[in-house]
Structures are given as structure tokens and as C-alpha cells.
Image: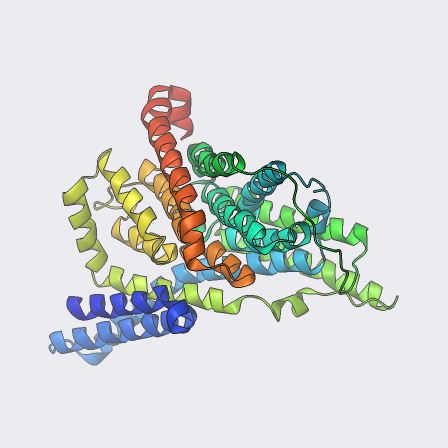
Amino acid sequence: MVVALVTIFVIGYFFIAMEHPFKINKTATALALGTVIWATFSFCNMVARPDLDIESWRSFISANLIENLGETAEIVFFLLGAMTIVTIIEDYQGFRVITDKITTTNKKKLLWVVSILTFFLSALLDNMTTAIVMVALLRKLIADKKERWLYAGMVILAANAGGAWSPIGDVTTIMLWIGGQVTTVNIIVKTIIASLVCCVVPVFILGSMLKGEIERPAETQSGVEVPAHLRRLILIMGVAALIFVPVFKTITHLPPYLGMLFGLAVLWLTTEIISRKYEKEGHKLPTAVSTLEHIDTPTILFFLGILMAVSCLKVSGILGSLAGGLNSAFGTEAPGFFFIDLIIGVLSSVVDNVPLVAAAMGMYPIEGVDAIFTQNHPFWEFLAYCAGTGGSLLIIGSAAGVAVMGMEKIDFIWYLKKIAWLALAGYIAGALVFILMDVTLFESIPFLRDLA
């Protein structure tokens, strides 16, 4: 059974990683993988346990499916709510409130402005959405395609670095936060400096090579113009709804997806009222209903499929065995677990970081007698950093990279030559900063040790 499940999982991973050469959408592969691997698990166990009656086996499978589907659904509904809120802001041109303030044409200065803005915006939104917004901005700022590619590459690095330190900035960090591996204050305090270094080092290196002014494209106006006061209102409400989620979790101790859905409900009601009012005045402004029609549903279904596949490996005991192998090879004490995280980070540039983090969560329970890395252990914070920023090493290694690649048609080899080495420099620099801070500051200063 173990060989069959691992073989299916590896084949599914291969087709997910080779999505672009094979031109097979990774969502279809992930859904097929999640279904086939559970069916194989059920069939193999039925064959291996002829003494077990069919009803008992159905109860066992049903209980495990429901339990794991519940954990997966928390992440899926959280993402659905977050993506809808961000798309509403985009539909109301809310991000123009920020982008219209950027007027510089100096190449070096623009690089710093775009990168730092992306870094912090990604912490509030998510790295993929932030990358999409910033590439749309770059198209308004830079006319030359190859020059724009350089800035788009840095957007990928900054978006991934910015999402790694925020509990709502990256899917993998969201997973760790919802799963209880990290808490809000802890993940911010322990990873923000390392993530900032990961962003700043490549910007500093590339910035030292840039000289002169950029050429801006001719301005064009299309679509429905949203009144300025409504753009500001929806931007403020949308960002407030996202920031409210950690507060909601802290106050109520309820799952974060409920806070996200509440924020969406408030924004939904607001857009309904606004749309009704302005329709009478001849305007046609969007509502959450129209926004849902162009939500990135394939991405949500991809997470559903891949997380269910990983949950099957957890139930079958394969992840537990893998954890034992890693523990034997590297150990569970520093610096051993740092190497485990670094390996996961590099792998996330080839294979999607979502299943890698899901696998780590399944391998290392945070409660019970088998718990090695408990809540807020440095292993989890460093995992958030490595999995979030390691995907920048290749353009296909993160959702932000794939989104930018699709929008700008950036060549894989071009990114490998021009951006990958910058991403590696930032990744290593940030990792060293995290390890040094964890070993020195957070272990030697009582106040910081208690806070972290």
C-alpha cells in the first residue's frame, strides 16, 4: 500500500510541477490526485483486512475523511473570503489610491518604492494578489517590456518575502496559523526582520546596477470610472476587514475563516447599498455577486485537492515515517531542524509549497506524546520563512511567480539567469539572520524569549 500511495503522489506532483510544458492545469491534477489516492488507500486496506466488515471500514474512512475535510475547509473558506474581498477592492479601483501616489521615474528609486510597497502590501493581502496588483501598476509606469520584467521579478521576491511574516500574507503561513503551529504575535516578531532582509538584499544588489530614468507608457483610460471617495471607502473597509481577522481570532477564539467571512459580509452589504444608489444615477458599480463570477476558483480547488491528498498520506502513517527518517538524518535539535526547513524551502521552488507545508504539518503533530515541535517552536517560524521565500528561486515556485509569468509572459530561462541568483542571495541572507536572531536574541534576552 505504501508503495502505491507514494507512487501516485509522486506522479501527481510531477504533473503539477510540469503544468506549463504539458499544458495540463494543475487544478485538474490536484483534484484527481486527491480522489485517486483516497480511493487507493481504501481499496488497499480492504484487501489487506478481509476480517473487517464493510460497515466498520466505511465508518473508519468516513470519520477520517470528515475530520480532514473539516481542517481543509477552514483554509479553503478563508482563502475564498480573502480573495473575494481583494477582488472587490480591485473592482472598485481601490488600489489606485496607492498607485496614483507613485510619480518618480528614477530607476533606482522606483525599484525601492515598488519593492517596499509590495513587501508590506503582501503582508495585508496575499502574495499572489499583491503580485497581480503590482504588475498592473508596473504596466502604467514602465513602457519597455524587458525593463518591466526586472521590476516584475523583484515584485515576486518582495511579495513572497512580505507574505512570509504575516499570518494572512501567504497560504502556507495561513495554514500554519490556522493549524495552531504559530500565533499572530509570534510569527510577526520572529520572522519580520529575516523576511525584510530577504527582500532588501536583492533590491540593494539590483539597485546598484540600475541607472537613469524609465520611460512611461502613454496613459489610456478604459472601463467605468469609480468616484474617488468610493475608491477610498472600499479600500479602507477591505483592508480593515483583512486586519480584523487576527483580532477576531484573539477575542473570540473562533477559527479565522469566520472572521474573514464576517468581514466579507460587511463589505458585501456595503457594495449592495452603493451599487443600488449609483445605479439610479446612471452608474453601474460592481457588487460582491458580480465579483464572485471572476474569483480564481481553480486556485481554491487546487488547494482542496492537494490538501486532501496530503491528509491521506497522514492518515496512512507515511508522513509519520518520513518524519522519523528526517529526525534520524538531521535530529530534532538546532541546527538539525534548521536544515530540514532549508531543504523544504529549496524544494518549494520546484514543487508547490502548499503540499510541502501540509506534509510537514502532518509529519510533526504539535500536541500529544508524539509532539516534537510544539506551538511556536522555531521550527515552525523558520518553516514559514523558508517555504514562503524559497519559492522565489524559480518563477514557477510560487503562486506570485506563476501569476506574474502568466501576465507578463516572462521566460523561464530569463528569470533563471536574471532573478534566481538574486532570490538565492536574499533567501540565504534572511535565513542566516533568522538563525542568528533565534540563537542569540530570542534565547538570551528573557523579555524576547517570553514574547516569542
Q: Residue at left 51%, top 44%?
A: 158
Q: Quadrant of residue 63?
A: bottom left
Instruction: Establish if 94 lies above or below 312.
Output: above
Q: Position of residue 78 (x, y in %)?
A: 51, 57
| Quadrant that contains the N terminus | bottom left
Toward the top, the furthest residue is 445
Write the residue at 14% across / 78% down. 47
> Which of 279/129 is in front?
129
Q: Measuring 31% from the left and 62% from the top, which residue is drawn there?
A: 311
- Quarter of the figure with the C terminus: top left
Residue furthest front in the image: 212
213 above or below 235?
above
Q: Position of residue 35 (x, y in %)?
A: 33, 74
Considering every residue shown, the one lying at the far right of the view is 281
Q: Tell me if I can see residue 185 in this picture.
A: no
Count of residue discs = 0
Q: Position of residue 383 (x, y in %)?
A: 35, 44
Left-right relation of 155 to 15: right
Can residue 212 be seen here? The reply is: yes
110 or 60, nearer to the observer: 110
Instruction: Give left or right: position of 137 versus 27.
Output: right
**10 left or right, relative to 81:** left
Colour scheme in use: rainbow
Residue 352 rendering spot, x and y as whole percentages: 37, 58
